[in-house]
Amino acid sequence: MNTKKIYWAGDSTVKKNNISTYPQTGIGQMLPMYLKNEVTICNHAENARSTKSFIAEGRLDAILTELNAGDYLFIQFGHNDWNEKPERHTVAFGDYQDNLRFFINKAREKGAFPVLITPVYMREYDESGVLKEKVHFDYPDAMLAVGKETNTPCIDLCQKSYEAIKNAGSEFSKNWFMNLPADLYRTAPDGKVDNAHLRYEGAVVMAGLVAEGLYELGEHYRELLISTEHTPVCIYAKNQ
């Protein structure tokens, strides 16, 4: 069997969770549902990391010690790069792009395939009940620009998830995120309102959109998926 490996650099929206944070679920946990059995995900995503802190803490170095020719490096950041803490903050059309180029170049030096993935959308509505735009400021656009400049495949999960949330509606999409009633989960006895991090159902939806992106890239990216005959995205329409 020809085993393929996907290394994933990212933040809490991607991270593999355990029972201590249940029901929070990362996109990287659910993507295997769409992949062939011989594809393995090596999930290096960690909470609250930006491109800057991920590199500074040696997390990319840890990936590079294992990364081999023919492997994939998924690069998904944008939730924390706008954070004002100096250890995280980057400028969208500045060092954020420089850091993305660094990820890309290091992957290519290893003979691996880098894939940029814009951040999953945050479910935020204005006072009129309209889904807000540009919740990640200029970071998705900055990533797309780097992808075009460096000829690196890019899955625009930000736009895909925006459309999914908008189409599903406020009430239906609420259960995709960590909006929890009180007295149901030991990890949140007082309940929780969190429209950035995903529950199981939401992670399945967003992983499906990543799978859709891989399908759209074609070639060997499509061959990672269980089905290469149609887009293997889960059903997310409202009123299902």
Image: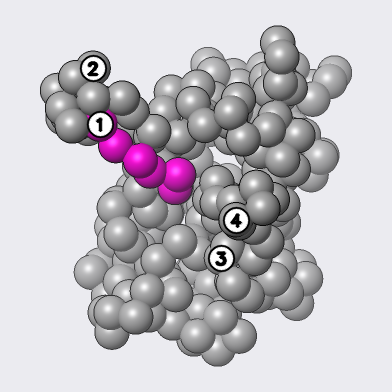
In the image, taking residue 220 as reference, residue 208 lies left or right, namely left
State the residue in front, 186 or 219: 186
Looking at the rendered structure, which numbered label has been put on residue 184? 2
Is disc 3 surrounded by few (<14), some (14 to 19) or many (20+) residues within 10 Å? many
Q: Is residue 226 visible?
A: yes
- Among the two numbered marks 4 and 1 on one chain, the one whose residue lies closer to the N terminus: 4
The amino acid at mark 2 is: Leu
Q: Compared with residue 202, is residue 82 higher up or lower down, i.e. above or below?
A: below
Label 3 to label 2, Cα distance in Å?
31 Å
Is disc 1 surrounded by few (<14), some (14 to 19) or many (20+) residues within 10 Å? some
Q: Which residue is mark 4?
A: 127
Residue 187's quadrant in the figure?
top left
Q: Which residues are magenta?
A: 191-196
Q: Which residue is mark 1?
A: 191
Q: Is residue 164 visible?
A: no
- Among the two numbered marks 3 and 2 on one chain, the one whose residue lies closer to the N terminus: 3
The amino acid at mark 1 is: Gly
State the residue in front, 70 or 153: 153
Residue found 71% across the figure and 21% down from its top: 238
Label 4 to label 2, Cα distance in Å?
29 Å
Looking at the rendered structure, which numbered label has been put on residue 93? none
The amino acid at mark 3 is: His
In the image, taking residue 36 as reference, residue 29 lies left or right, namely left
In the image, taking residue 17 as reference, residue 166 lies left or right, namely right
Q: Are marks 2 and 1 in contact (CB under 8 Å)?
A: yes
Residue 143: image location, x then y, percent: 64, 69
Of tags 4 and 2, the one toward the viewer is 4
Local secondary structure at mark 3: loop
Q: Which residue is mark 3?
A: 136
Residue found 72% across the figure and 40% down from its top: 166
